[in-house]
Image (cartoon, helix red, strand yellow):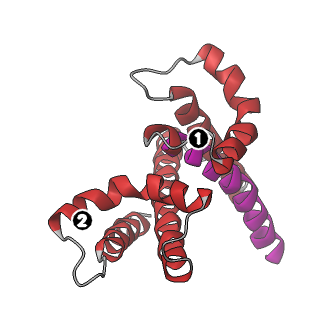
Amino acid sequence: MNTDAALKFLIDVIFDSYAFIVLARLIMQLVRADFYNPISQFTIRATNPLLVPLRRIIPGIGGIDLASIILLLAIVLIKVLLLSTVLTGSLPNMIVLLFVTARECLSLVLGFFTYAIFLQVIISWIAGQSYSSAIQMLHQITEPLMRPVRRFLPPMGGLDFAPMIVLVALSFVRILLSTQS
């Protein structure tokens, strides 16, 4: 029994870590984050071995990197297949497989933004107004989610409630996803 839990943990860590890096690259491209930022350079170097050959087959459309999306879906699909095979000894039917893969991808995106916002909040408490490439990257990634909330609810008395509102919304969607299991 513990072997199954340990194997599930190992598969989750390996596949989710790489999927997280691919997702980071995709999001950084979408928000047009600084290409020369060290974090961008890391994600590019980590994902290029699989993305460069894939891009020869799958071109981007309208500024959207379809190869990154396909790679992300493939990583999550392989993870779901592995987990299903290892833990149940059988493959799920195709509809269940596609549903679980889509749910896992959406959960990964929600988790990515949740972590990014938490990091940004913690850094703002510790580092305040200092500048670093990591802080700049977090701002570029989270600002598309924060901007609409800030328009509706601007900072009051020097306090920015946008991160809290966005985190509540992200948590709400994650709870909805988890109840649909």
In the rendered image of this protein, does residue 156 appear above or below residue 64? below
Q: Earlier in the sequence, mark 2 or mark 1?
A: 1
Secondary structure of the residue carrying tag 2 is helix
Residue 80 falls within the magenta-colored stretch = no
Q: Main secondary structure of the magenta part?
A: helix
Chain part drawn in magenta: 1-27
Q: Which residue is the site of mark 2?
A: 150
Question: Which residue is nearer to you in this view: 94 or 34?
Answer: 34
Identify the residue at horizontal 62%, vertical 15% (top origin): 57
Residue 12 falls within the magenta-colored stretch = yes
Q: Amino acid at mark 2?
A: Arg
Secondary structure of the residue carrying tag 1 is helix
In the rendered image of this protein, does residue 164 appear above or below residue 81? below
Task: Residue at the far top: name it.
Answer: 56
Q: Amino acid at mark 1?
A: Leu
Considering the image in quadrants, where does the N terminus appear? bottom right
- Dot 2 surroundings within 10 Å: few (below 14), some, or many (20 or more)? some
Question: Which residue is nearer to you in this view: 84 or 132?
Answer: 132
Identify the residue at horizontal 53%, vertical 67% (top origin): 115
Considering the image in quadrants, where does the C terminus appear? bottom left
Q: Which residue is the site of mark 1?
A: 72
Q: Is residue 151 left or right of residue 121?
A: left
Question: Which residue is nearer to you in this view: 29 or 103?
Answer: 29
Q: Is residue 177 left or right of residue 123?
A: left
Question: Which residue is nearer to you in this view: 36 or 179?
Answer: 36
The x, y position of residue 173, in whole percent, is 35, 65
In the rendered image of this protein, does residue 69 appear above or below residue 24? above
Instruction: Estimate the spatial distance between the alpha carbons at disc 2 and disc 1, rounded to whole Å.
Output: 31 Å
The x, y position of residue 49, in whole percent, is 77, 31
Identify the residue at horizontal 83%, vertical 71% (top origin): 3
